[in-house]
Amino acid sequence: MAPAYNEAIAPFLAGTIGFLKRPRVRVLVVGGGTGVFSRDLLPAVRRCLQRWGQNVQFSVVETDIESVVREAPASSHRVQANFHQLPFRDGSFDLIVGQSMIHQGEMQKSIPEIGRVMATGGCFFHTQDSTPVGSAHVGEWMRRTQNSPVKRLGDQENAREWMEHNARIHSETSQAAVELAKRHGLSSIAFIAKGDAVVSKNHRIGQMQGINLDTANHVFYYHGGISGRTDPSVPADKKKLDYAGTVIILAKTSTTALAHHLKQLPD
Ligand SMILES: C[S@@+](CC[C@H](N)C(=O)[O-])C[C@H]1O[C@@H](n2cnc3c(N)ncnc32)[C@H](O)[C@@H]1O
């Protein structure tokens, strides 16, 4: 994940962790791929917690159906596991993290399974990164994504079409996940964590902003300059996020209090 993406998401994940009020947080990563959570997002989360003077210990289990979890940092416990049928006891984890996985597999199985291993008072924090469609960004993204269909297609119009298609899928699956969660007794929050100006100019983010998540208990859009605020070394004219994230939190706790807490995060 791009550093800007982690910087946009980290305060919200750190805020969620702070809200759990536990000195030791048992984290399960589902569909963890190569371990980007442990490698990139967790260090950014730790920096936030440190800045806010919060001391939290983590035990992290990284899982994925493929053996790619071999590449996760060795500080995490790594288990090959299908998120349709997780090899853990009920209520084993305070925080379950998924990045870009909810649209994979069968949500009718994964959402209740995630709910089952979630401890009372716990949360599932899912993020989907969103790459802006502005042509400069498409070019940059194409360079980054070595094996993606975007690169294979190799032209910006097709790339835009492909990314817009993806955005639609992500919006639809977000909505479906929230609806399913409700049926399984989980409350929810949905929001978009993003940076500055890019958002208002950007068609695709605008589209994602328009997602109708009426079934979520709380829906809000974050319009801050999180990366600018958290990184004073970023010059003013660069305080734009190339990446934004659609965040869904499913919880066995009060999402009213959590939503309030996330809107009041310190810098
Ligand atoms: C788009 S990748 C995201 C990987 C990683 N979270 C990231 O952000 O880079 C989705 C991941 O979900 C995993 N996956 C797909 N179906 C799965 C299942 N049924 N159980 C566990 N993992 C699964 C894939 O192997 C893949 O690593």
Image (cartoon, grey):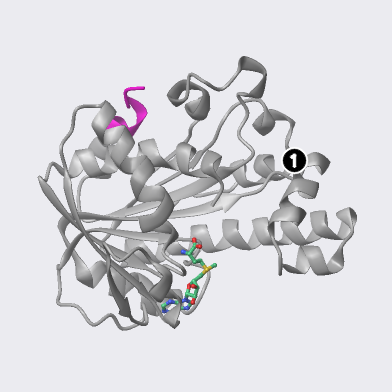
Q: Is residue 116 left or right of residue 205?
A: left
Examine the structure image and report whether residue 261 is included in the region drawn in magenta: yes
Other residues around mark 1 within 10 Å, as few (<14) / some (14–19) / many (≥20): some
Examine the structure image and report whether residue 32 is included in the region drawn in magenta: no
Q: Is residue 102 left or right of residue 92?
A: right
Choose between 259 and 212: the one closer to the eye: 259
The C terminus - image quarter:
top left
Q: Is residue 67 visible?
A: yes
Q: Which residues are magenta?
A: 260-267
Numbered disc total: 1
Choose between 101 and 174: the one closer to the eye: 101
For the point 20% across and 39% down, the residue is 19
Q: Which residue is mark 1?
A: 203
Q: Is residue 216 visible?
A: no
Residue 20, percent from left and from top: 17, 45
Location of residue 254 by image quarter:
top left
For the point 44% across and 74% down, the residue is 107
Choose between 215 and 2: the one closer to the eye: 2
Q: Secondary structure at mark 1?
A: helix
Q: Residue furthest front?
A: 74
